[in-house]
Image (cartoon, helix red, strand yellow):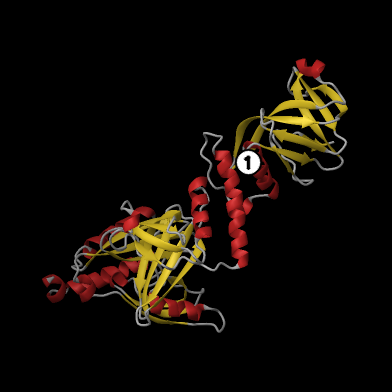
């Protein structure tokens, strides 16, 4: 400290700052313009190493350097980190980073890092409302590209003017979320019965000039609640949005979606600390959502689809996760629904498209048992593709009524098997589990044909 304030240490450190800054400003070629392009790697390292001992004499901050190429690195998570500064060359993709670490708590008072500037808000862009949310409740945001102009004052020569910048304000990793951030939330009906329940994690909280804000996420990321409390007005709001639950186990996600369906007028909530008696929790009156009709329909569609996967899960030891629903095709979804119906003991009648037929590959020793013109009962595997995996759900019984043999011949790739090509008068066939004699009849429209193992193929 004495050397810094009385013996010229401050000037030496500033000179070292400038030397490092010049090295990191890659385009150059002279004093103040960056590194000499004739320097080789060893000389550059030598120059940096010569400056680092002087930087170590800074009584307030310590500096750590990182170098790399291509993607900028993430901001590291470490104690007392107050700033990361990264300079890059768009042409080469190379970057250098300086992490500024406070040596003591007084450092940020003695030589604080300050940012001042202004945002440009385009009329009708909605960014004005975003800024109001930030100042009112501390809501994180990312500004439009190029909307910020300002000045950064920071140690180590890493400050300077900021032009046409994008600003992101986000929660601090490992920030204070308060005690008991794990919560349990129930939906209680008018009779006092628990109809649905989930576990929630408090993932963010903030405050501003208007009040406080709390963000709760269902433990599998299925949905997110954001509560805002206007402290001066004595009021509050709750918003909900679906999260990204791709890759999560099907059954917990299905349960969370059904929880949302139970959040309707007439029902209330009860919140408790996780792993404590729920009946000792506090009443939460803000669960009686009046969902828009479109939202109800979309939610019901998700529940119906994942319910089919849940049925399939009960018949396989492989863990089924929610696939990327954005890339899901209608045929894939229909196959899940049909497989679920069969597994639930229902008989499904399928219609194959016109100008197509049924191709069946059977063992050659069954030839004598094929009696044309009568009802054929065949055992075929029920195979369904989910999230890149083919699941064999066991044999199902396939029934062909009044079938017509179009062609028969040896299987082209599998010796000992015979390929049959059939048609039926109404282009229909039935599937059910073996032994389900009282199976409920279910029909599928043309084009919604199942593919237990490729029975329906172009003629």
Given residues 146 and 381, the one toward you in this image is 381
Q: Position of residue 251 (x, y in %)?
A: 50, 46
For the point 85% across and 30% down, the residue is 403
Q: Which residue is mark 1?
A: 340
Task: Tell me the quadrant of the picture where the C terminus can be found.
Answer: top right
Q: Position of residue 160 (x, y in %)?
A: 37, 76
Q: Position of residue 334 (x, y in %)?
A: 68, 46
* Residue 77 against residue 232 in the figure, above or below: above
User: Going by the image, does 406 lie left or right of 181?
Assistant: right
Q: Secondary structure at mark 1?
A: helix
Quarter-of-image position of residue 357: top right
| Count of labels in the image | 1
Residue furthest toward the bottom?
Answer: 123
Given residues 196 and 398, the one toward you in this image is 196
Residue 327 appears in view: yes
Residue furthest toward the front?
Answer: 191
Task: Tell me the quadrant of the picture where the N terminus can be found.
Answer: bottom left
For the point 31% across and 58% down, the residue is 280
* Residue 359 against residue 371 in the figure, above or below: below
Residue 73 appears in view: no
Local crowd at mark 1 within 10 Å, few (<14), some, or many (≥20)? many
Quarter-of-image position of residue 438: top right
Given residues 98 and 371, the one toward you in this image is 371
Q: Position of residue 224 (x, y in %)?
A: 46, 61
User: Going by the image, does 35 lie left or right of 319?
Assistant: left
Quarter-of-image position of residue 21: bottom left
């Amino acid at each position: 400290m004495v050397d810094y304030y009385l013996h010229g240490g401050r000037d030496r450190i500033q000179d070292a700052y400038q030397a490092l800054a010049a090295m990191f400003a890659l385009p150059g070629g002279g004093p103040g313009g960056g590194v000499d392009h004739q320097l080789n790697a060893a000389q550059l390292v030598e120059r940096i190493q010569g400056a680092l001992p002087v930087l170590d004499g800074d009584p307030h901050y310590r500096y750590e350097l990182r170098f790399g190429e291509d993607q900028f690195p993430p901001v590291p998570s470490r104690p007392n980190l107050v700033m990361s500064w990264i300079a890059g060359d768009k042409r080469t993709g190379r970057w250098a980073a300086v992490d500024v670490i406070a040596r003591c708590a007084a450092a940020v008072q003695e030589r604080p890092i300050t940012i001042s500037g202004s945002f440009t808000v385009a009329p009708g862009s909605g960014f004005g409302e975003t800024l109001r949310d930030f100042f009112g409740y501390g809501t994180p945001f990312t500004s439009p590209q190029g909307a910020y102009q300002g000045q950064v004052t920071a140690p180590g020569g890493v400050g300077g003017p900021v032009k046409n910048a994008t600003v992101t304000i986000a929660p601090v990793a490992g920030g204070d979320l308060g005690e008991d951030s794990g919560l349990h939330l129930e939906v209680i009906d008018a009779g006092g019965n628990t109809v649905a329940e989930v576990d929630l994690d408090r993932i963010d909280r903030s405050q501003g000039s208007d009040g406080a804000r709390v963000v709760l996420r269902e433990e599998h990321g299925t949905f997110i609640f954001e509560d805002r409390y206007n402290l001066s007005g004595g009021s509050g709001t709750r918003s909900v949005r679906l999260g990204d639950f791709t890759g999560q186990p099907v059954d917990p996600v299905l349960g969370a979606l059904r929880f949302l369906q139970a959040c309707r007028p007439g029902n209330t909530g009860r919140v408790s600390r996780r792993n404590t008696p729920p009946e000792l929790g506090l009443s939460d009156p803000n669960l009686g959502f009046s969902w828009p009709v479109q939202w109800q329909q979309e939610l019901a569609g998700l529940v119906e689809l994942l319910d089919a996967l849940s049925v399939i899960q009960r018949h396989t030891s492989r863990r089924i996760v929610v696939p990327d629903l954005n890339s899901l095709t209608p045929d894939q979804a229909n196959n899940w629904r049909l497989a679920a119906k069969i597994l639930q003991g229902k008989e499904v009648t399928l219609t194959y498209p016109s100008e197509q037929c049924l191709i069946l590959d059977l063992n050659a020793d069954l030839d004598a048992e094929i009696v044309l013109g009568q009802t054929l009962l065949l055992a075929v595997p029920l195979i369904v593709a989910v999230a890149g995996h083919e699941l064999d759900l066991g044999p199902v019984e396939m029934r062909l009524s009044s079938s017509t043999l179009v062609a028969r011949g040896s299987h082209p790739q599998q010796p000992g098997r015979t390929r049959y090509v059939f048609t039926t008068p109404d282009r229909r066939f039935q599937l059910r589990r073996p032994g389900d004699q009282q199976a409920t009849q279910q029909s599928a429209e043309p084009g919604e044909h199942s593919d237990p193992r490729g029975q329906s193929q172009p003629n």
